[in-house]
Image (cartoon, grey):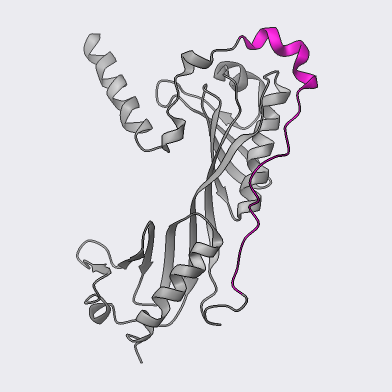
């Protein structure tokens, strides 16, 4: 029995090691008796103060044939209170909760179509949105759902952690491009070439010209890396 508990604890450590640092909170430090706050939950409102997440785009596109489209936005928000995930699992719709597998409750909404990981510490990880504005709206909706269940939820420290975008360009000779010092290409392991010319952002490009960008925090970062990468890749265009 002791061996099984050790395996479960090691599995939890591996899972939480993959999440952003600000999600590591001691739930015991912020324990809250949610039952005593049900009567006053109706007077709690979500504050409207947060980051200005309006996208910053260049006045002209990098190239007419390269127009990046955001495919996924990952963000986090703090609700400022502890949660009873069992209560949420019983009262809310479209949720999954299996504490033996993950300590987080999974909740989904249709508009914007997103998925949230909700932790008892009051932290939420939101994924699946197609824009920064959509991710922020989805995070607000999750906070509002929790608030309606009787918890004194607030909307605190909303932050974008990752933007994943894709775009199409022209066919590229990856074998020649691989000699660039910022590129990594191992066709035996992965058919695409990785470019890491901008710190924190990785571009994966395939011989067909399709590109995937990950690691950006804003849309301006996506255009910045494309402006850096496009002159390089243009020299290795296949005819």
Looking at the picture, how far across and down is residue 68, in whole percent?
53, 69
Residue 18 x %, y %? 36, 38
Q: Is residue 216 magenta?
A: no
The quarter of the rendered structure image containing the C terminus is bottom left
Residue occupying the point 32% across, 27% down: 13
Where is residue 159, by image quadrant? top right
| Farthest right residue in view | 43
* Residue at figure coordinates x 70%, y 12% from the top left: 37
The answer, for residue 106, to whether it is visible in the render is: yes
Where residue 192 sits in the image (x, y, percent)? Answer: 31, 68
Q: Main secondary structure of the magenta part?
A: loop
Which residue in the rendered view is the most extreme toward the bottom? 239
Picture quadrant where residue 141 is located: top right
Residue at the image position 36 percent from the left and 80 percent from the top = 233
In the image, residue 78 sits, relative to residue 68, either above or below, namely above
Residue 171 seen in render: no
Task: Classify 110 as above or below 212.
Answer: above
Quarter location, residue 44: top right
Number of callouts: 0
Residue at point 46%, 31% (across, down): 23
The N terminus, quarter of image: top left
**Which residue range is magenta in the image?**
33-58
| Residue in the foreground of this view, choosing between 112 and 63 | 63
Depicted 128 relative to depicted 231: above or below: above
Please check the rendered image and state whether residue 39 is part of the magenta-colored stretch, yes or no: yes
Question: Residue 151 in the image: x percent, y percent?
Answer: 67, 19
């Amino acid at each position: 029995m002791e061996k099984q508990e050790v395996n479960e604890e090691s599995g939890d450590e591996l899972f939480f090691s993959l999440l952003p640092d600000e999600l590591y909170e001691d739930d015991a430090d912020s324990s809250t008796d949610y039952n005593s706050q049900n009567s006053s939950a109706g007077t709690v409102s979500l504050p409207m103060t947060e980051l200005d997440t309006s996208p910053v785009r260049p006045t002209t596109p990098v190239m007419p044939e390269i127009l990046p489209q955001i495919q996924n936005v990952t963000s986090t928000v703090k609700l400022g209170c502890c949660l009873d995930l069992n209560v949420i699992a019983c009262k809310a719709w479209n949720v999954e909760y299996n504490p033996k597998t993950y300590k987080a409750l999974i909740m989904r909404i249709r508009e914007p179509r997103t998925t949230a990981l909700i932790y008892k510490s009051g932290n939420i990880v939101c994924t699946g949105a197609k824009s920064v504005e959509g991710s922020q709206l989805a995070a607000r909706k999750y906070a509002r759902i929790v608030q309606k269940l009787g918890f004194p939820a607030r909307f605190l420290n909303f932050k974008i952690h990752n933007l994943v975008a894709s775009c199409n360009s022209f066919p590229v000779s990856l074998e020649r491009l691989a000699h660039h010092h910022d590129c990594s290409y191992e066709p035996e392991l992965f058919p695409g070439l990785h470019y890491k010319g901008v710190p924190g952002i990785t571009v994966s490009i395939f011989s067909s010209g399709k590109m995937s960008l990950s690691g950006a925090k804003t849309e301006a970062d996506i255009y910045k890396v494309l402006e850096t990468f496009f002159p390089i890749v243009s020299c290795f265009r296949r005819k």
